[in-house]
Amino acid sequence: MNRLVYFLYRRWFSCRKRLARRLTSGGKVFLAMTFAACFFGLNPERSMFFQLFPLLIIIMLTDFLFSLGRKPRLKIRRKLPETCIAGQQLSYPLAITNLDQQKSAWIFISERQEQQAVSGDDFFSISTGSLVSRIKQWRHLFDKKPANHPVHRLPEIRAGASLEFTANLRPLRRGSLHFQGLKVFSACPFGLFKREINYPQQANLLVLPRLYPAPKLQFTGSRKYHQGGLSTAGKSGDSEEFISLREYAPGDPLKKIDWKATAKAGDTIVRQFRDEYFSRFGLLLDTFCPKDKAMIFEEAVCVAASLLAAHNPGENLLDTLFAGDKKCCVPTLDQGRADQLQMMKILASVQPCLADNFDNVTSMVREHLKLLSGLVVVLVSIDQDRAKFINFIAAAKIPYRIILICEDKEAEQARLKSLAVTARVALLEMDNIASDLITI
């Protein structure tokens, strides 16, 4: 069954790709009508179809010959922003110059997007679960188009004239969106075939995760002491929060001497620092995810990004924690001075770890728990190791929120009960992420 589905998919993908290069949408419909007329016209008694088939063939052949004619000559420059958000429409300007000696009319433009077919390894890796579950995962694999690029009709451009045109697209997936170039085509007399020319203009655009409406999480955890203050909250070492300069006093460490100020003043000058107490929260994303839970992992990243976007960096610190096979990354978003966009970029590029070693997460959180005033955990599945981790967090006596992305709430509730999980876990169902997230 799997091999038959994959075989049919490859044939359909190849055929669709070839037709899209030469035919317009109307041309595809017209081609289907021609095949239908050919099929029914085989019976001479059906005289209408028998006479219609040659007429359709003549029309298509005429339009095809026109498509081999002169093509538009334009100079195009694209201006892209640095980032955009998945699921939200992006508008960007195109600077277009007509290089022809005559005006250009009925010209259409679109981004050139080469979609790659799904590999056999990825397809056959989906072999577990019910037929409905596998179909959903196959659809997720097949729909690998990173963005919707609409076709835009350009206004009439006089010979040698220039204009700025606003194009738009809708990115569908987070990550790096690669632009190969632009394709410009003019319609033939019957609008069935394209006179197309490609303009290579490679570029990359970072697509941030899709955002859902999310609550601003409030914790009652007390502020904690951080040696070195805000400047060292996300770093290692003994440097501290700078206050001012003062004269050297016996016992001051040599590393605090400001040698430039000492040279100017003629006396030994040291830098004065202070330590601070403040609230620091953690946002933990479960990155250990098998291939058959790729859809759940993508939603988990979107949930983490939504919570991050709802956070006000002016009130407290937020650490986003990831655990991998060998190391963890703990960037710190401080009180209004760090770049929140940088953390969103990290979430846009994070990838799942196929080897499930959740002990790394437990050890990482244990190291940082004494610094945290609260913790939010986003999980992609539940098993014995994760159940132990949830109970460990519940026993740590700090405010917490556990979020589990799932396909069936009732099944996951029964599993949590069987694993003796006593802590409160907010379940977010795949089909109702937006409505479930706002109520956690």
Image (cartoon, grey):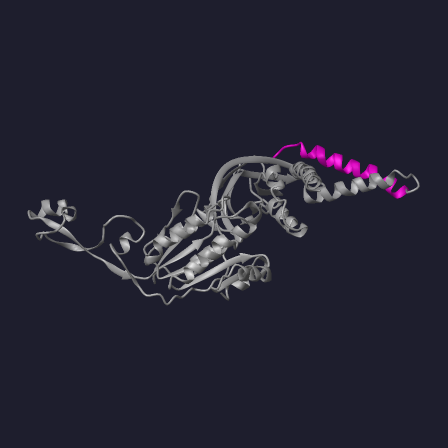
Looking at the rendered structure, the number of numbered marks drawn on it comes to 0
> What range is drawn magenta here?
47-71
Q: Is residue 99 visible?
A: no
Q: Is residue 364 left or right of residue 147?
A: left
Q: Quadrant of the N terminus?
A: top right
Q: Position of residue 439 (x, y in %)?
A: 50, 66
User: Which residue is nearer to you in this view: 366 or 67?
Assistant: 366
Does 270 appear in magenta? no
Q: Position of residue 164 (x, y in %)?
A: 50, 46
Q: In this view, which residue lies farthest toward the left? A: 266
- Let me know if residue 165 appears in the view: yes
Residue 10, given in percent of the width and then of the height, sits at 67, 38
Q: Residue at coordinates 46% horizontally, 49% vertically from top-left? A: 358
Left or right of residue 242, residue 395 in this image: right
Of 112 and 193, the residue lying toward us: 112
- Depth check, front residue: 322 or 115: 322
Q: Choose between 177 and 433: the one closer to the eye.
A: 433
Residue 237, position as x, y percentages in the image: 25, 48
Q: Does 63 sit above or below residue 289? A: above
Residue 14: image quadrant is: top right
- Any magenta on residue 60? yes
Please name the predominant secondary structure of the magenta segment in the image.
helix
